[in-house]
Structure formats: structure tokens, C-alpha cells
Image (cartoon, helix red, strand yellow):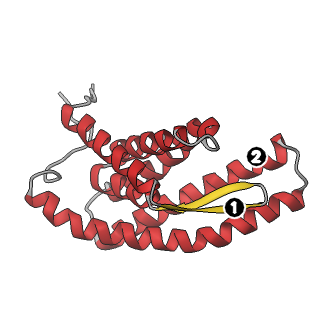
């Protein structure tokens, strides 16, 4: 029977990456929209990077925790911190799951970044539809207007996030391996 153990190294990795997600999310540009505030920030880059470097569970937890803490510091986003945790967890988890299947390659790392970023966007769009159409009972035209206005901004942001995450991964990996941080690092799947 497999026993998953959360080691001190795992907890430290998750805490450090969650802190980096929080700090990177604070590097932002707020953009007002007709139905509220949105923003372009650097946090998604670190969310995807966490998964690609440290695996799906560590990456997902770091992404979710760091992003949820950020939401709790902003009165506008605070009520949805738990939704943010779920959405960002999925982004880091998916990027990590793809990056950690079989042998890593450049193509797999790019695919991990693309899938992590796009999965978040799909979940975000779904959340907006549920919130505005089903809960707030906004007309469908209004919902489409919100989606179009936020998606125009997001396409540019998503492209930047993917490129930056892949570049950071490529730059950091040799140094982390040399330091012994990710060499032979099996994230939270050690068995006894």
C-alpha cells in the first residue's frame, strides 16, 4: 500500500512558492471593467512554474495558497478567495501533471505551460458565466460583453505568462539541479 508523506522539504517548497505567487500577484496592473475590477499580474507565471518545477500537488497547493492569500488582502476579491484557491490549484496541478509525466522535454514543458494557463482561463470563463448568468441573472448579452472585454486583455496576458514561465523554467532548472534542489526530487510520492 502506498503512503504519501508530506516531508519538511515539501512543506518548505510549498510555502516558498506560495510566497512567490503572492508577491508576483502583487506586481499588477488593475483594469476597471463595466462589471468590476480585473487585473493583469505576474502571479500566473509562478503558479505554472511551481507545478513544472515541483510537481502537480506541490505546484497546485503553492498556487492555490499564494493566490488565496492575495485575495484575502483585497476587499474586492476576498469573498471569492476559496474559488481562487480552486482555480489556481488546478492551474499549478495541471502544469505539474503534464511536466512530470514520463521524461521531461522542451516540448512537454511548453505544453505544460500552455495547458496550465489555458485550463485556468477555461475555469475562469466558466466561473464568470455561472456568476453573471445563473446567479446574478444578468442578460446573456451582458455576460458576453464581460467575457469579450476580459478575454481581449487575457489573450495578451496568457501569451506573456506562457513565454515567461518557459523561460524562467529553462533558466532556473540547471541552477536548481546543480544546487541539488530538484535533482532526484520526487514530489510527495515517496513510498515506504
User: Which residue is more in the foreground, 25 or 3?
Assistant: 25
Q: x%, y% of residue 72?
A: 53, 37
Quadrant assignment for the C terminus:
top left
User: Which residue is more in the foreground, 147 or 97?
Assistant: 147
Please give the name of the residue rendered at 83% of the width and 43% of the height, measured from the top-left corner.
Answer: 134
Q: Is residue 153 above or below residue 33?
A: below
Earlier residue among tags 2 and 1: 1
Q: Which residue is mark 1?
A: 32
Q: Which residue is mark 2?
A: 130
Q: Is residue 173 above or below residue 17?
A: below
Instruction: Please identify the quarter of the rendering in which residue 131 is found.
Output: top right
Taking 31 as reference, is 55 left or right?
A: left
How many marks the image carries: the answer is 2
Please give the name of the residue rendered at 62% of the width and 39% of the height, measured from the top-left corner.
Answer: 80
Taking 190 as reference, is 100 left or right?
A: right
Does residue 93 appear in the picture of this structure? yes
Please give the name of the residue rendered at 37% of the width and 66% of the height, measured from the top-left corner.
Answer: 165
Q: Is residue 1 above or below residue 36?
A: above
Q: x%, y% of residue 119?
A: 55, 57
**CB atoms at circles 2 and 1 under 8 Å apart?**
no
Please give the name of the residue rendered at 67% of the width and 55% of the height, measured from the top-left corner.
Answer: 37
**As drawn, which residue projects farthest toward the right?**
139
Task: Name the front one of labels 2 and 1.
Answer: 1
Question: In terms of secondary structure, where does tag 2 sit?
Answer: helix
Instruction: Please identify the quarter of the rendering in which residue 7 is found.
Output: top left
Quadrant assignment for the N terminus:
top left
Does residue 189 appear in the picture of this structure? no
Q: x%, y% of residue 16?
A: 28, 44
Taking 137 as reference, is 63 left or right?
A: left
Question: In terms of secondary structure, where does tag 1 sit?
Answer: strand
Query: Could you tell me how far apart the alpha carbons at marks 2 and 1 are, in whole angstroms?
Result: 21 Å
Amino acid at each position: 500500500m502506498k503512503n504519501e508523506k508530506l516531508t519538511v522539504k515539501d512543506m518548505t517548497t510549498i510555502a516558498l512558492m506560495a510566497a512567490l505567487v503572492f508577491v508576483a500577484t502583487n506586481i499588477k496592473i488593475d483594469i476597471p471593467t463595466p462589471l468590476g475590477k480585473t487585473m493583469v499580474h505576474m502571479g500566473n507565471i509562478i503558479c505554472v512554474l511551481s507545478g513544472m518545477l515541483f510537481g502537480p500537488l506541490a505546484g497546485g497547493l503553492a498556487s492555490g495558497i499564494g493566490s488565496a492569500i492575495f485575495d484575502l488582502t483585497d476587499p474586492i476579491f476576498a469573498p471569492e478567495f476559496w474559488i481562487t484557491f480552486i482555480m489556481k490549484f488546478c492551474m499549478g496541478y495541471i502544469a505539474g501533471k503534464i511536466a512530470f509525466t514520463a521524461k521531461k522535454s522542451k516540448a512537454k514543458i511548453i505544453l505544460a505551460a500552455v495547458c496550465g494557463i489555458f485550463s485556468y482561463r477555461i475555469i475562469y470563463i466558466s466561473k464568470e458565466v455561472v456568476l453573471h448568468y445563473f446567479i446574478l441573472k444578468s442578460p446573456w448579452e451582458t455576460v458576453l460583453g464581460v467575457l469579450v472585454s476580459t478575454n481581449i486583455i487575457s489573450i495578451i496576458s496568457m501569451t506573456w505568462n506562457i513565454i515567461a514561465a518557459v523561460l524562467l523554467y529553462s533558466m532556473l532548472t540547471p541552477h536548481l539541479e546543480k544546487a541539488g534542489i530538484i535533482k532526484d526530487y520526487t514530489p510527495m510520492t515517496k513510498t515506504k
